[in-house]
Amino acid sequence: MSDLTRRIVVLGKTGAGKSSLANTIFGETLFEIDDSANSGTRVCQAETKFVNGTQLMWVDTPGFFDTSRPEEELKSEIEKCIEKCAPGPHVFLIVLKVEKFTEQEKDVIKKIQQCFSEEALKYAIFVFTRGDQLPEGMKIEQWVDLDQDLRNLVKKCGRRCHVIDNIRWKKDQTDEYRTNKFQVAEILKTIDRLADANTKSCYTIEKLHAAYGSWVNWSVGVAGLAALVSIAVIVAKK
Ligand SMILES: Nc1nc2c(ncn2[C@@H]2O[C@H](COP(=O)(O)OP(=O)(O)OP(=O)(O)O)[C@@H](O)[C@H]2O)c(=O)[nH]1
Ligand SMILES: [Mg+2]
């Protein structure tokens, strides 16, 4: 595999448009889309192809953090997404919609940071789907700035953010900013820059194990504490 291959793992809530984004970037249907409310992608899928002269090794993932799965299955699937692009990704693309940044979205982001560590944002680029919801004349950075939590989050990753519309921007648009051709080129430029910066220190499985270990310990700790409190309440009532 060429040294210049850009290794990318895509993360985000179920239905955010992760698989659709991949198909838009590659210009063909490589990943299955589910139009129902169910989770479409069940397991990680990797594809390697050239786009505009850049070789991308792309790993699409299921909505890891908003679907209920047994702990062991979740852990193994998360490991697979890093292993599929060994030695590890240069970039995490985190997909959100141009929509209100609700507690549910915040929770998914929090879990991404807990699972992959705070350091994951060093590797992150935010891509917002459903760009047709972006108010006329507004750039995505301006829209992000309207919500303080979203602004602070995107600031933590060097304000790297882009917008796309996988469905409605396929047709010719008069405003170049609102075309996938323009936005795909911009996303590729940001991927290139970040991958260059992270060439010698990509996100590795060791980093995942270190972060995941503390996350699991923390989760088990909280669950254990909750169990102890419940027992204490029952005993006190007797
Ligand atoms: N209008 C609009 N619809 C979109 C856009 N991106 C995705 N969708 C629709 O949203 C639904 C979910 O898209 P997917 O690409 O399957 O989402 P996903 O994040 O891969 O979902 P999971 O695989 O379940 O995690 C589909 O009906 C898509 O057609 C977009 O930019 N604009
Ligand atoms: Mg999908």
Image (spheres, rainbow, N blue to C red):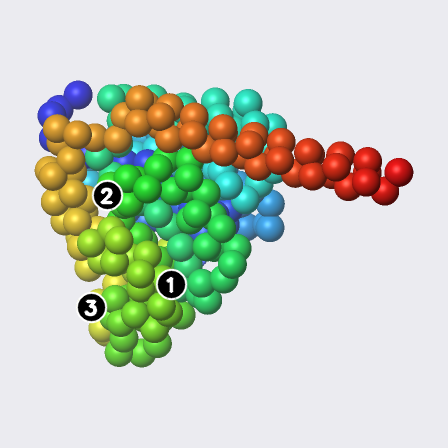
On the image, the x and y values in percent for residue 157 come to 24, 51
Residue corresponding to mark 2: 122
Compute the Cα span from label 2 to label 1.
18 Å
Q: Which mark is residue 149?
A: 1
Q: Are marks 3 and 1 in contact (CB under 8 Å)?
A: no
For numbered disc 2, what is the local secondary structure?
A: helix
**Percent from the top left, x then y, of residue 225?**
62, 35
- Residue type at mark 3? Glu
Is 77 on the left-hand or right-hand side of 57? right
Q: Residues within 10 Å of mark 3 (few under 14, many from 20)?
A: few
As drawn, the label of residue 109 is none
Up the image or down, 162 lies above or below 237; here it is below
- Is the residue marked 1 within 8 Å of ligand 1, measured from its CB? no
Question: Quarter of the image holding residue 193?
Answer: top left
What residue sits 43% from the left and 47% below the top?
110
Tell me the residue that label 3 is attached to.
176
Quick one: label 3 or label 1, which is nearer the N terminus?
1
Viewer-nearest of discs 3 and 2 = 2
